[in-house]
Amino acid sequence: MIDAFLPYPPDPNDSAEEATSETSLRYDDVIQDGRIRLESAWRPTGRLLWGDPDVARIFRSMQPKQTNVLSRVALQASEAVLEPRAKTRTRVSHRFEHTLGSDGEVDRLLFSTWVTTEGRGPDGVFRPASRAYGQRVFTRIDAPPGQHLVTTLAGFGESGVPPHRVTWEPATRLLDLPDGAIALEESPRLDSIPLLFGLSHTDLNQHVNFLMYHRAIEQAALSRAVALGVGARLASREIDLGYRKPSFAGEQVRIALQAFRRAGDGHAEAPFFGVVAAVVDDDGGPAERARFSDFPSPRVVAQMLLRP
């Protein structure tokens, strides 16, 4: 069980498909004190999913220029200390889903995944190490505005729609302070260093890989933590990322942040430090704004919690 502060979508019920594996952590999957690196929570996802027959069947039913893109990722890591290159046990489940629009009609198809990893500690005991949730939306490449969402796929049978219905949550909800958080700043402010994307930040989807946003937001959060007197001996342990539009090699963006602490953690020196963040275009306006909506429309939004 991971003691988490930020919300995490619950694992699906017994009707969800599952895959499991045993492997080992890489040397760079853990930080200096033996805790798993937050990004490493995501790594088992593809290895266990893309060879799954059910997943492959649905993906084969997509038409040309149809694809799926990440719309939300939640990563959480425990405080368990693991041995170098620790043995791990990983469980992955997935579920295809749909949402309804205000007219009661299907307006999008989703592919959601849940990954949980246990790692072996120096005492030989396996303990919860991390978990990762991913939500993907089926979409049409180069479709006109308002027509990019895919609402049926032949792989789902006569109806073209998976049976599980969920409620769509817009990414911008992450721009509010999470429940149980107390702001350390009255308003959001741009990080002083612009973020420039190169080819090494991209992947085969032809845009910036989602993990690059986690790294950039963590770096900006550390700078803000130093400015607020918390210090930089922190590591990201939880993040909830929402994606609104992609970034590409050669583009420059800025990161707007507002720092918070958990209620009951004391003052700015508290060990639990968090930020609400948005990756935005630079409009040349003031660094500090009254609210996140005063910045240009965000590409990526996030809530992140860091611990020493």
Image: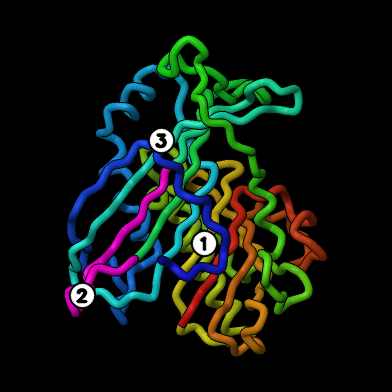
Evaluate if marks 3 and 1 touch, with contact meaning CB atoms under 8 Å apart: no
The kind of secondary structure element at disc 3 is: loop
The amino acid marked with disc number 3 is Ser
From this viewpoint, which residue is outermost toward the top?
158
Q: Is residue 141 visible?
A: no
Q: Of helix, strand and loop, which one carries label 2? A: loop
Residue that numbered label 3 is attached to: 15
**Which labelled disc corresponds to residue 239?**
1
Q: Which residues are magenta?
A: 113-128
Q: Position of residue 158 (x, y in %)?
A: 48, 10
Q: Is tag 2's residue or tag 3's residue first in the polypeptide sequence?
A: 3
Q: Earlier in the sequence, mark 1 or mark 2?
A: 2
The percent coordinates of residue 59 (x first, y second) are 37, 24
Q: From mark 2 to mark 3, how far is it between C-alphas? A: 34 Å
Residue at point 42% right, 43% down? 113
On the rendered structure, is 267 left or right of 211?
A: right
Residue at 53% x, 64% y is: 217
Estimate how packed mark 1 is, as few (under 14), some (14 to 19) or many (20 or more) residues with alpha carbons within 10 Å. many
Residue 9 visible in the shown view:
yes
How far apart are the alpha carbons under marks 3 and 1? 27 Å
